[in-house]
Image (spheres, helix red, strand yellow):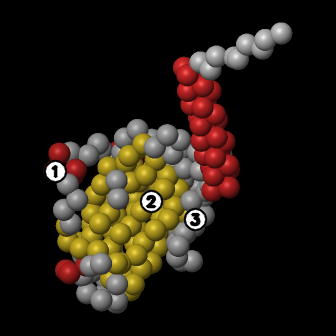
Amino acid sequence: MELKKAKKNPAKIISLVALAVIIVAAAGYGSYAFMAKTWPFATQKPATANDATSKPFTDATSDSSTSKPPSASDQDKTPTQSTPPSDDSNTSSGNSSSDNNGITGSINYASATDDTLKVRVTITELLNSGTCTLTLSNATTGSSTTYKADIIANPSSSTCDGFNIPTKNLAKGDYNISVHLSSGDKSGVASSKVTI
């Protein structure tokens, strides 16, 4: 009785090896993603502040008739000088208003590094358009500078387009940061402090 040797099919072997490589790679990425809490295992965390003095957005107490869509000249982030405020009306109290049309979020990053003050704002709801107006006030002199940026939509939240402010024209010292958000009939304000 003679045994027949099984013929090895090279195409079948290549297919099995490729399938095994794909399964091992998928399992490896799945393990990594689970341990590193990246997609698809990432969870949406509320925005956290790097500065203990940051305050969350609260409903703004401004007249909605003063809100207008950004014009073409507002779209650039060119600073404008203004006089110092005479009272504390530009700072957030940290208390929410009972009006349900407010925008909530926070200044989650404000730091001066590499000759640039970087300010990042996270908005906890999805907004497709709007304006962020940042007012930077010198805590000593009271002089202030205003910058504008667009609201950018993320998959489930929004953010300001980001503020990268050159520090070469800013005096060293403590600054108060106030960000006013406007989108349609909704608005909000957040404040924080930073040292340059």
Instruction: Quadrant for the N terminus, please.
Output: top right
The answer to the question of whether label 1 and label 3 lie on touching residues, with beta carbons closer than 8 A, is no
| Disc 3, SS | loop
Which residue bears the numbered disc 2?
121
Q: Residue at x 69, y 17 (%)?
A: 6
> Which class describes the residues within 10 Å of circle 3: few (<14), some (14-19), or many (20+)?
some
Q: Percent x, y for residue 88?
A: 44, 75
Q: Residue at x 30, y 89 (%)?
A: 172
Which dot marks residue 48?
3
Q: Percent x, y for residue 134?
A: 34, 64
Taking depth in this image into account, of 87 and 185 the one nearest to the observer is 185
Instruction: Answer yes or no: is residue 53 visible.
Output: yes
For residue 84, above or below residue 9 = below
| Disc 1, SS | helix
Q: Name which residue type carries label 3.
A: Thr
Q: Name which residue type carries label 2.
A: Val
Which residue bears the numbered disc 1?
73
The reply, left or right, for residue 37 in relation to residue 185 is right
Q: Name which residue type carries label 1.
A: Ser
> Which class describes the residues within 10 Å of circle 1: few (<14), some (14-19), or many (20+)?
few
Q: Which of pointers 1 and 2 lies earlier in the amino acid sequence?
A: 1
